[in-house]
Image (cartoon, rainbow, N blue to C red):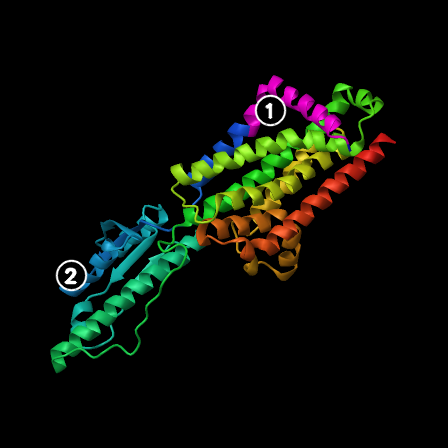
């Protein structure tokens, strides 16, 4: 392989990119637009859940319980209901997602040391939000119940007993449990996987459609030199997209990068080599820009979005699907980026996944080169 030939092919591809503003726009603007849309629209936080309350007791104890819900960031009081039908109507029309019913004599039963019942009505059409809202409400009610028991013991015995357990949770890496800190690094991996494959999926197929491939075949350029020359310009664009995504994550979304910036770009280099090779492989096989782009989108977007662990935990998937995820390169890059962003991990912790990504990149590049050699015959 002669560097001069590779440089000539790379220069030719760079000139085509510069002469085609749409390709350049797709390479730079689409990743930023996708990061903006997904970064702001996609969230796993359940905050300010609309709440409607029917307080049939009206005692200080019931008002104290309601104030706990109002003071929590997880609930937002929509209104007070005066009958059961009001709760049903609000839940039916989605003006509220949760209804809290406090029965009569709630405060009296608590003061007497008896069990008081509280009903929670939840709209289950969104199962994820419903399950989280139930968990938040249960924690608030149990905390209020424990406080009432301690107050009762203090009135009866002059002092409150020590709690049998002292539970002190401590969250590492993401203390505020902001889903954005988890989503943005994974989103960078997914977007780079899609864009890289789409960009190179048009390269070789364009030569066939424009009728210039025969001229390249007639030149002394080898298959490996042509593949490398086609990859280099888009490799530079991919790194530029990574830099843009990192800047947006830091200054627009406020996601801190706790790991090394050089290590991040080194891992992105390994990942991009495989992602770009996927696109050029489809471009070689299909010889059609439309078909190549469709194949690249089908084999990158859905697997990267659904099977990489970006949206859904892999351990919760069926066992056969879990084994399938090992074939998805975005799975490893999502893990690497999250470990870098949230944990500040170093080379020792990331070496295993990085080596798997490197093996994938080498395998895809060799496969594209081998397939193109067959196309020349």
- Residue at numbered disc 2: 58
Residue at 51% across, 28% down: 29
Image coordinates of residue 229 in percent, x first then y, are 70, 29
Q: In the image, is residue 330 part of the stretch drawn in magenta?
A: no
Residue at 54% across, 32% down: 240
List the single residue furthest toward the bottom.
Answer: 157
In the image, 294 versus 77, the foreground residue is: 294
**Which quadrant is home to the N terminus?**
top right
The quarter holding residue 362 reads: top right
Secondary structure under the numbered disc 2 in the rendered image: loop
Task: Please report the bounds of the magenta region as a residue range.
Answer: 2-27
- Residue at numbered disc 1: 23
Residue at 25% across, 57% down: 69
The quarter holding residue 72 reads: bottom left
Secondary structure under the numbered disc 1 in the rendered image: helix
Sequence-wise, which precedes: disc 1 or disc 2? 1
Circle on res. 38 = none
Q: In the image, is residue 11 part of the stretch drawn in magenta?
A: yes
């Amino acid at each position: 392989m002669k560097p001069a030939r590779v440089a000539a092919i790379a220069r030719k591809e760079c000139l085509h990119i510069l002469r085609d503003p749409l390709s350049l726009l797709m390479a730079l603007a689409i990743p930023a637009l996708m990061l903006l849309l997904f970064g702001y629209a996609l969230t796993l936080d359940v905050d300010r859940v609309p709440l409607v309350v029917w307080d049939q007791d009206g005692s200080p104890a019931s008002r104290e319980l309601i104030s706990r819900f109002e003071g929590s960031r997880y609930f937002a009081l929509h209104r007070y209901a005066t009958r059961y039908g009001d709760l049903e109507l609000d839940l039916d029309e989605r003006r509220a997602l949760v209804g809290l019913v406090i029965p009569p004599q709630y405060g009296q039963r608590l003061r007497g040391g008896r069990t008081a019942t509280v009903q929670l009505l939840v709209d289950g059409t969104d199962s994820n939000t419903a399950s989280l809202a139930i968990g938040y409400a249960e924690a608030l009610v149990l905390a209020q119940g424990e406080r009432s028991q301690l107050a009762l013991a203090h009135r009866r015995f002059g002092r409150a007993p020590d709690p049998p357990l002292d539970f002190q949770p401590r969250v590492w890496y993401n203390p505020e449990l902001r889903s954005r800190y988890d989503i943005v690094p994974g989103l960078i991996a997914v977007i780079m996987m899609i864009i890289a494959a789409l960009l190179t999926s048009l390269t070789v197929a364009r030569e066939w459609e424009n009728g210039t491939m025969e001229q390249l075949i007639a030149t002394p350029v080898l298959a490996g030199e042509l593949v490398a020359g086609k990859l280099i310009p888009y490799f530079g664009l991919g790194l530029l997209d990574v830099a843009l995504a990192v800047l947006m994550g830091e200054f627009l979304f406020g996601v801190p990068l706790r790991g090394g910036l050089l290590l991040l770009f080194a891992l992105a280099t390994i990942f991009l080599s495989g992602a770009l090779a996927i696109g050029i492989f489809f471009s070689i096989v299909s010889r059609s820009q439309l078909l190549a782009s469709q194949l690249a989108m089908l084999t990158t977007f859905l697997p990267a979005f659904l099977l990489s662990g970006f949206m859904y935990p892999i351990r919760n998937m069926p066992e056969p699907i879990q084994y399938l995820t090992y074939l998805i390169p975005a799975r490893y890059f999502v893990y690497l980026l999250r470990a870098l962003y949230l944990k500040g991990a170093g080379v020792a912790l990331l070496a295993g996944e990085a080596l798997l990504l490197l093996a994938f990149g080498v395998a895809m590049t060799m496969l594209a080169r081998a397939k193109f050699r067959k196309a020349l015959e």
